[in-house]
Amino acid sequence: MADGGSAKRGEVSGSADTAPDLDRLLGDLKALEALPAQWDEAARSGAQALVAAVDALNAEAFRRLIRHLRDVPGSGPALREAATDEVVYTVLRRHGILKPSLFERVETALETVRPMLASHGGDAEVVSVEGDSAEIRFLGACDGCPASQLTFYAGVKKAIQEHVPEITTIRQARGLGGGGADTVKFTSPFANYKDDEWRHAARLAELEDGETRFVEVDGHSVILSRFGDRVSAFRNACAHMGLELTGGEISKSDSSGAVITCPWHGFRYALDSGECLTAPEVQLQPHGVRVKGQNIEIRIVT
Ligand code: FES
């Protein structure tokens, strides 16, 4: 086989100055990948076989190279450092030499629920993955559909827990930007309703971080909680027998902000998601909630 260049065997060539432009290379690859679609079957099969053979040769070379380097005392940190280079990582991943990172696996899990989220006009992105925790930002909303937060949480959490069982804590990303009185800074998932359906519930400044209070909105008793700049609102009715949760003990929770215990028979609920921790098949009924300027507004879901 030809050596494909002027470098002698054993001589390392190339430097940062002569490195090809990565964006251009990726662009070329994308364009080339599309070409075989226009070819006949024989040409397409030949091209695929050639790519597979070159890939297999490269993969074997990388494996041997890594095996050799591993035998060099003290090379571990250098190899790990090299693997953080995005090009090295991408190529080694392509050849199956590196396993997907937790971040990628969480991203893969989200891919499985994106069609469901998209059908509600929503989406989600991975903000961070650290240790056994993942932070997810929910994007968009479902126009006019009062789909429950249970669907959302159950879908996203279930997908992540199935694909990445090492992740045991899944949080929703918090943090609102600035903005004027008319700026909507937070909208609960699937709560993008018409403007005239929103009702004032409280001033944001009145509700301290971590606080839960019971408010009346349009004759409905609502459980309102604030965690950072995120606000949740649920019908004040236990999923067990529909009795009010007013007076239930509220305790702080690392994973869900706070947990309320029904004063009647002890069902426990995460106050950020409404999930029932006692009977996971039920949950609190969520209302749409948004923070507009300094006002918390609720869209009652009956
Ligand atoms: S009504 Fe809440 S646990 Fe029974």
Image: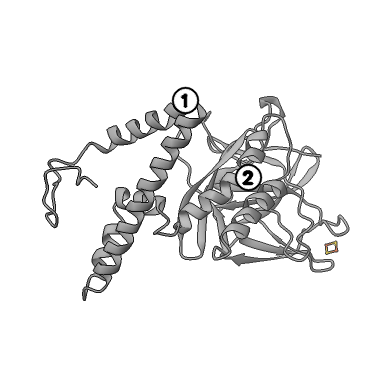
Tell me residue 234's x, y (percent): 73, 48
Q: How many marks?
A: 2
Q: Earlier in the sequence, mark 2 or mark 1?
A: 1
Residue 204, numbered label: none
Q: Secondary structure at mark 2?
A: helix
Q: Residue at the spot x=23%, y=70% of the render?
A: 75
Residue under label 1, please give it.
39
- Which residue is at the far right? 241
Tell me residue 184's x, y (percent): 54, 33
Closer to the camera, 47 or 167? 47
Quadrant of res 70: bottom left
Q: Label 1: how many residues lie within 10 Å, few (<14), some (14-19) or many (20+)?
A: few
Q: Viewer-nearest of labels 2 and 1?
A: 1
Q: For this view, does 113 lie left or right of residue 40?
A: right
> Which corner quadrant of the figure contains ligand 1?
bottom right
Structural distance between the alpha carbons of marks 2 and 1: 35 Å
Q: For this view, does 54 lie left or right of residue 136?
A: left
157 w.r.t. 165: above or below: above
Closer to the camera, 275 or 18? 18
The amino acid type of the residue labelled 2 equals: Val
User: Which color scheme does this rendered protein use?
Assistant: one colour
Tell me residue 204's x, y (percent): 56, 44
Pointer 2 with pointer 1, Cβ within 8 A: no
213 w.r.t. 31: above or below: below
Q: Secondary structure at mark 1?
A: loop
Closer to the camera, 263 or 86? 86
Determine if residue 193 is in view.
Answer: yes
Residue 113, numbered label: 2
Q: For this view, does 282 lie left or right of residue 201?
A: right
212 w.r.t. 50: above or below: below
